[in-house]
Structures are given as structure tokens and as C-alpha cells.
Image (cartoon, rainbow, N blue to C red):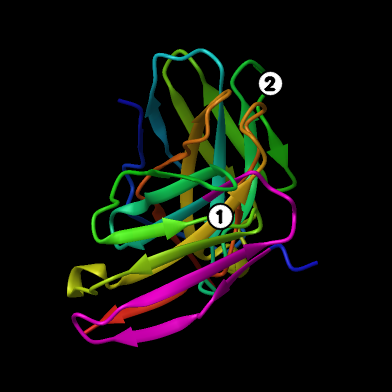
Amino acid sequence: NAGVTQTPKFRVLKTGQSMTLLCAQDMNHEYMYWYRQDPGMGLRLIHYSVGEGTTAKGEVPDGYNVSRLKKQNFLLGLESAAPSQTSVYFCASSLPGVSGEKLFFGSGTQLSVL
Amino acid sequence: AQTVTQSQPEMSVQEAETVTLSCTYDTSENNYYLFWYKQPPSRQMILVIRQEAYKQQNATENRFSVNFQKAAKSFSLKISDSQLGDTAMYFCAFITSGTYKYIFGTGTRLKVLA
């Protein structure tokens, strides 16, 4: 009963380095999301996907790219990391929002950019 | 724009006492859903309670209950008989029926004191 799995859990990058965060869900959910959590700012939506092969920008998309080649996976990429991207990143998934379905969250990735 | 406001950044309560966390939201829609999520130090996001806007009856889950005031656009969370395990960050969230974007508040950090 894995639910939503994020890898890695922790990562330290130097400014300018690149990395990819992987999110996998085994619940056959259509919708997937990437959020970042910063102190005093709650959860802010970076990118989201409403189905395989489709992605869209959220509230704070600059500096990030995403891909959803398979329904169960949603990747978040940082091409050239900046200190402002130091944050905790959460992946989440849900069924289509017809009935206000709850979000299922991964356990988060703590990213530090030095 | 739809917004969620949590005006109490931090709160504390004595063990076994009752505490209320406030949340207000702004929307012009009539059909929507409201949530309270708990984030303990483990960082995992856990759904505490969900409320359907078309239901006048306040949702309850064991020691957790809400006071939903639709006209005032208020959705407060009451925790009765507070326990040390209730120490966590609490997020209020909102989604309009038929959409995919969840809107989160900035969170309230609750500390339960022994």
C-alpha cells in the first residue's frame, strides 16, 4: 500500500546544478501536483498535471520543468538550481475534482541549494 | 481570486484543553469543499477533516470538529481534549467543485503543552 512515493527525501545542491525529483503513485489517479512549502507561505503550487502527457503551470513555475510521460509518474526538474529554490517539495495526487476528493501526499523532499 | 487566510501563525494549548484554529476563505463560487490537513514533525500531510459546502451540518471526526459558517466564509477547526500528538502544523485548504486547484492557507503551528 505505497500510495505516493517521492525520491529522494533529502538533497543538497550547489548553485547551478540540476536535479530531478521523482513522484510515483499507485492509485491510478489522474491528477498530480508539485508543491513547495516555505515558512510562512503555506503550500504553493508549482506545476500540475490532469492526465498522462499533459502538464500546466501553477502559481510559482519559474525555474522548474515537469513531465508526465506515464500516468503513475510525475517528474519535477530543476535545470539550474538557485538558493531561492531551497524548500520542502511535496508531490500529491487525487482523483478528478468532481467531488472535492482529498489530496494524497508524498512524504516530501528537503532540498537545500548552497 | 480565491484565497484562504489563517490569521494565527502559532498557538499553544494545555493538554486536555480545547483549542480552535481559525480559517477564512474568499470565493464567489457556491459549490466547494474545505479541508483541514495536519502536518506533524514527520512532515507527512494527513487529512483531518473535510466539509462539503452544500451541507449545513458541521463535519466531525472524533475529537476534531469544524464550525462552518458559509455566509461568513469561515471554517474553524476545534480540537477537543488536546493530546501531545496533536502538536503539528495545521493547514486549511479549499477547492471548487469540478476543478483541480487546491488553495492552501499559510498554516497555524499548534503546540500542545504537557
**x and y percent of residue B56 in the render?**
65, 16
State whether residue B105 appears in this view. Answer: yes
Q: Is residue B73 above or below residue A46?
A: above
What residue does disc 2 label? B57
- Judged left or right of residue A107, residue A38 is left
Tell me where the magenta segment starts and ends, as one range: A4-32
What residue does disc 1 label? A92
Cα–Cα span, label 2 and label 1: 29 Å
Q: Is residue B35 above or below residue B73?
A: below
Chain for disc number 1: A
State whether residue A108 appears in this view. Answer: no
Q: Residue at x 41, y 76 (%)?
A: A110
Name which residue type carries label 2.
Answer: Gln
Q: Quadrant of the N terminus of chain A?
A: bottom right
Tell if the residue under mark 2 belongs to the same chain as the one under mark 1.
no
**x and y percent of residue B46 in the render?**
61, 57
**x and y percent of residue A100 in the render?**
62, 32
